[in-house]
Amino acid sequence: DKPQTTRNRIMCVLTTDNEQVIFLDTPGIHKPLHKLGEYMVKAAEGTLQEVDAILFVVDVTEDLGGGERYIMERLQTTKKPVILIVNKLDLIDRQSVLPIIEKYTKAYDFAGVVPISAKEKMNLDSLLVELNKYLPEGPQYYPADTVTDQPERLIAAEMIREKVLHLTRDEVPHAIAVEVEEMKAREGGKVDIRATIYVERESQKGIVIGKQGSLLKKIKSMARKDIETMLGSKTKLDLWVKVKKDWRDRTNVLRELGFKNP
């Protein structure tokens, strides 16, 4: 729900009896304020050249603003069909949706418009029907059980980061990174994971840890449950919080944390 929280391009694969659709979830296009932002925008804009169609997802509860207009300006340079996906349909009266859609369609010539609720899985079939109009026929590139190209270590790091985003105040999310430093199986099918949450300032470290470590314990508990579900194994999760001052503007640190030029 917070903007610019997707940092790497993530491939997800949907395979049905009749089709296989490959989705590339990219960082949002925005005006970068630091080297990490520059990396994210390059990853997003580079992906636009590789795909057959673009899904522009907007929040129906928020008005069309400068950020959305900036993205639509950048999309003017692509010849790929752009489908407007109006999300969070479950949070608004149906009669209020059409005026919001009209604002967007007046600002950009979308190939199609699909209102959905990702949370409630509402209208997702219509999204696929609309998307399939623009996808070419081709071979099945991935086995039917493939769902993502992300290794388990990176997925675990994202699960931890997602819990931090969910539980901390607005000033923290963009300043955090998570690195899984160790992930190893032991006897009995259990998995040991050691991970570090990086922040930019001591004050942010205090927020993430919480009073007497209360928030960090909550992050750890929630993340561990998700990781255990993913791995199908009992997991011991050790979390640390460290300060790397201004890490988002330090190229060497970005490389250490896995952010490489797209």
Image (cartoon, rainbow, N blue to C red):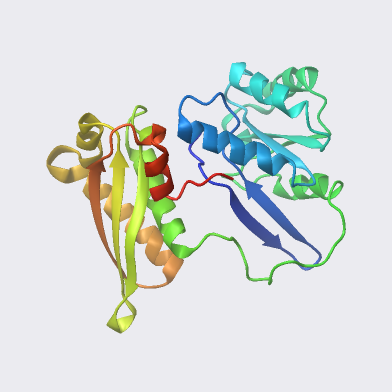
Q: Position of residue 235 (x, y in %)?
A: 31, 68
Does residue 157 appear in the picture of this structure?
Answer: yes
Write the residue at 34% across / 27% down: 171
Residue 177, placed above or below residue 142: above
Image position of 19 (left or right of 93): right
Q: Which residue is situated farthest in the bottom direction here?
A: 187
Q: How many marks?
A: 0
Q: Position of residue 103 (x, y in %)?
A: 73, 17
Q: Quadrant of residue 72?
A: top right
Image position of 93 (left or right of 183): right
Write the residue at 19% across / 38% down: 210
| Position of the C terminus by quadrant | top right
Residue 241, placed above or below residue 72: below
Q: Quadrant of residue 70?
A: top right
Residue 183, placed above or below residue 213: below
Instruction: Out of 205 and 1, give the one closest to the viewer.
Output: 205
